[in-house]
Image (tube, rainbow, N blue to C red):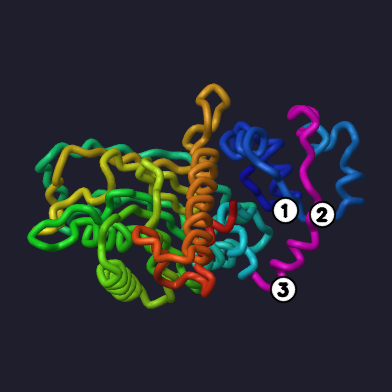
Amino acid sequence: MFTVYAEKEIFENIVLFNDTYPNWYKIFSNHSEVCLNITDAELNAELTQGTPIFEYIMANAGKEPIALKDFFDDIHLDKSVIAEKPRAAFLLNYPKVETDAMQSSYGIIVQNKDNIDDNILKGTYFKNLPKNLVIENQQCIGWKKLLNFSIPPSNSMVINDEYLFTNEENSRIIGQFNVLHLIDSLLPHNLDIPYHILIVTTQKNKSNEWYERLAGNLKAQIISLRQYPIIFELVFTDSIHKRKLILNYVNATCDKGFAIFKVSDNKTVRETNDLRFDRIFNRIDPHEGDSDYTDTHLILTELKSICDKAKNDISTSAVHIPNKRILGDCNPDKSLKNRLINDV
């Protein structure tokens, strides 16, 4: 489940004024484990009729918040610990200037009691992309124009596209140019920790030199995009069919993959495609089916299993496995560093 770390006062305000914060209240009730900055004894003292916490529990079939004061004490000592929870949100009693700085520094949702954004996890964008459509305006083209809207903070990214590097245009790999522009459109301008990027794809019957050259070129191009460090990992294995882009709080899909634009101009759609870009609780009510958070959790879990299998196959096989590679900034044992993969 999604985890929300909240001060008791903020949690109570959202519960009491759920008409003002309907999305956060539904996230609490239907999708979350809520951890509060109180002790077990303080939580037990709230289990009395008439308190906001008691009324919340009664309204939600006995679902209790979790007392977790020790972790909030850790945040007070070292704010960077929030980066260890890449798919969680934090509602904290710091001044707005501090919560804004924490959100910007670590790519994690952090809000204070006076600035609760009820829509930060809800919203969608859809774009139909007919063949030869030109995506541009006076300021930007291609992916930068396509994604020219507000997105939640992030510090990690996973891209799955089994045919990403399959096609070429004038001897140039179309997916290489597209994914570079896609990443550039999504990376935050500033971050105080390394950003994690993982690409999972399939590519068969290529030489070892081809794999190594592509990985090296992509890494060099990607790390040049920003001043902060970027951890880049590239896995070639038997991927899943769904083309997915997952950020901390985003679930995005391209029907025919992310190599949308022609290399010749980076703005003309190669073939009919579409882009759906959803925040993780765009679908929030039970009658709407699975939330995008649930979907991303399932996809990340499946990708983790696939990458673990590739790691084991590579490390245990007595012979060379031609179509499986784990390249880039992975650990020496070929396990992955990516925060999103390691959060499931």
Q: CA distance from mark 1 to mark 2?
A: 8 Å
Element marked by disc 1: loop
Tag shown at residue 7: 1
Magenta segment range? 56-79
* Label 3 or label 1, whichever comes before in sequence order: 1
Task: Please tell me which residue is depicted at 71% across the width and 36% down the height of the picture.
Answer: 16
Is 193 inside the magenta-drawn segment? no
188 lies left or right of 143: right
Q: Which residue is mark 3?
A: 77
Callout 1 crowding tier (Cα within 10 Å): few <14, some 14–19, many ≥20? many
Q: Tag 3's secondary structure?
A: helix
User: 111 or 168: which is nearer to us?
Assistant: 168
The x and y percentages for residue 35 are 73, 50
C-beta proximity under 8 Å, tags 3 and 1: no
Q: Which mark is residue 341?
A: none
Q: 93 and 28: which one is in front?
A: 28
Query: Is 249 situated left or right of 185 in this image?
Result: right
Residue 265 seen in the current view: no
If the image is split into quadrants, where does the N terminus sit? top right
Asked if one can make out residue 12 in the rendered structure from this viewpoint, the answer is yes
Residue 135: horizontal and vertical position, in percent?
A: 16, 48
Residue 2 at x, y percent in the picture: 62, 45
Cα gap from disc 3 to disc 1, whole angstroms = 16 Å
User: Circles 1 and 2: CB distance less than 8 Å?
Assistant: no
Q: Callout 3: 10 Å neighbours few (<14), some, many (20+)?
A: few
Asked if residue 68 is among those painted magenta in the image, a careful observer would answer yes
